[in-house]
């Protein structure tokens, strides 16, 4: 005998729910209330990665950085005074954030904090106290990388916010060119200064246009242009580039770095010299800062990544 089924739902237009479902089995009406189906709609649906509750932010080591540093475009160097934080998933490091000691002098910081800007009439005492204040109250996010398998799920800005809380400093800074294209810093609660050209932008553009045919932004084209020159001209061009870099680099002309600047710059090859000149004259990372609302010492050393969602980005951490 052949049996056939026919579904006869009862639909409510006011609630959007199927209230009951009946079936015709072999032509007879049968009611199966246990098969009742309900449909609900979220007012503001929001995608959520299911493994976020299993991810934890905690202190790491340089071994965590070494594990993932090849995924970062500045893999060759670490900042002064680094501290490492890892994003853990079931014992596996899937993200690393490195904080460092902030720069003593920073033009963008002086726009946001004009009271710590040098006036030109500073003494040794005021300069010393400025550096002490910055070291005691500022920390900078220097390196940050997430495993490619876990990008695009919101792990980056969540970890930035939580690490900034765990650091315990009043202010956390970030200087990032990627912030022009990816708003992870803004999502983490950072506020950014208006974009600024590099300090040596005009000098750098004049130098490139006077000595090269290639676009000043095209690194490979400039390097190839130098390498294809006759040997005598190439040596002269490289020396010219080194002199320009040393003259215009604040890093080579301030602090203890000045003592070995000549030796260090003379050892630079073509690629590192052009890269350094572009960094001095063309780089324009956005400067962002976040103020910690949590009292120092009140944030645990280990937090689930989902703790970011327990409160607003600029509110005190709400522990369960």
Image (cartoon, rainbow, N blue to C red):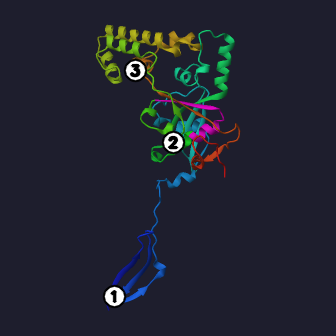
Residue 97: which quarter of the image?
Answer: top right
Residue 266 in view here: no
The magenta stretch is: 161-176
- Quick check: 300 above or below 75? below
Q: Residue at x 35, y 23 (%)?
A: 217
Q: Quadrant of residue 119?
A: top right
Q: Seen in the image, is 274 located left or right of residue 62? A: left
Residue with the mark numbered 2: 156
Q: Which residue is mark 3?
A: 271
* Vertical order, 41 against 171 (above or below): below
Q: Is residue 167 magenta?
A: yes
Q: Of tags 1 and 3, which is closer to the observer?
A: 1
CA gap, disc 2 to disc 1? 56 Å
Q: Secondary structure at mark 1?
A: loop
The correct choice, above or below, for 177 with respect to 304 in the image is above
Looking at the rendered structure, the secondary structure element under dot 3 is helix
> Is residue 243 at least partly visible in the picture?
yes
The image shows residue 244, relative to residue 174, as above or below, that is above
What residue occupies the far right of the structure in this picture?
297
Is 159 one of the magenta-colored residues? Answer: no
Could you tell which of marks 2 and 1 lies nearer the N-terminus? Answer: 1
Label 3 near label 2: C-beta < 8 Å?
no
Taking the spot 64% from the left edge, 44% from the top edge, the residue there is: 317
Viewer-side label of 2, 3 = 2
Percent from the top left, x then y, of residue 157? 52, 41
Residue 79 appears at what percent x and percent y? Answer: 56, 27
Residue 48 vs residue 87, the one in the foreground: 48
Residue 77 vs residue 138, the one in the foreground: 138
**Residue 3: numbered disc:** 1
Classify 10 Å Cα crowding around label 1: few (below 14), some (14-19), many (20 and above): few
Query: In the image as oriented, which residue stretches furthest toward the bottom?
Result: 1
Evaluate if marks 2 and 1 touch, with contact meaning CB atoms under 8 Å apart: no
């Amino acid at each position: 005998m052949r049996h056939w089924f026919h579904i006869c739902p009862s639909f409510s237009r006011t609630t959007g729910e199927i209230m009951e479902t009946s079936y015709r089995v072999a032509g007879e009406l049968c009611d199966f209330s246990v098969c009742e189906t309900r449909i609900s709609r979220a007012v503001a649906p929001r995608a959520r990665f299911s493994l976020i509750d299993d991810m934890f932010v905690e202190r790491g080591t340089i071994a965590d950085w070494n594990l993932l540093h090849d995924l970062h475009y500045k893999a060759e160097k670490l900042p002064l005074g680094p501290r490492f934080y890892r994003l853990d998933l079931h014992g596996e490091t899937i993200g690393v954030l490195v904080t460092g000691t902030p720069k003593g002098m920073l033009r963008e910081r002086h726009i946001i904090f004009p009271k710590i800007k040098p006036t030109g009439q500073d003494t040794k005492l005021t300069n010393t106290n400025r550096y002490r204040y910055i070291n005691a109250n500022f920390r900078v996010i220097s390196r940050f990388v997430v495993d490619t398998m876990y990008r695009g799920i919101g792990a980056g800005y969540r970890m930035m916010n939580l690490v900034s809380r765990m650091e315990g400093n009043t202010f956390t800074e970030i200087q990032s060119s990627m912030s022009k294209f990816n708003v992870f810093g803004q999502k983490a609660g950072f506020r950014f200064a208006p974009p600024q050209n590099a300090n040596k932008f005009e000098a750098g553009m004049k130098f490139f246009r006077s000595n090269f045919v290639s676009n000043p932004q095209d690194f490979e084209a400039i390097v190839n242009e130098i390498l294809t020159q006759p040997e005598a001209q190439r040596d002269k061009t490289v020396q010219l580039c080194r002199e320009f870099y040393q003259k215009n680099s604040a890093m080579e002309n301030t602090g203890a770095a000045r003592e070995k600047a000549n030796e260090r710059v003379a050892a630079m090859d073509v690629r590192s010299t052009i890269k350094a000149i572009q960094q001095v004259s063309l780089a324009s990372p956005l400067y962002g800062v976040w103020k910690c609302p949590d009292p120092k010492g009140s944030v645990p050393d280990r937090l689930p990544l989902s703790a970011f969602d327990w409160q607003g980005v600029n509110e005190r951490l709400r522990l369960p």
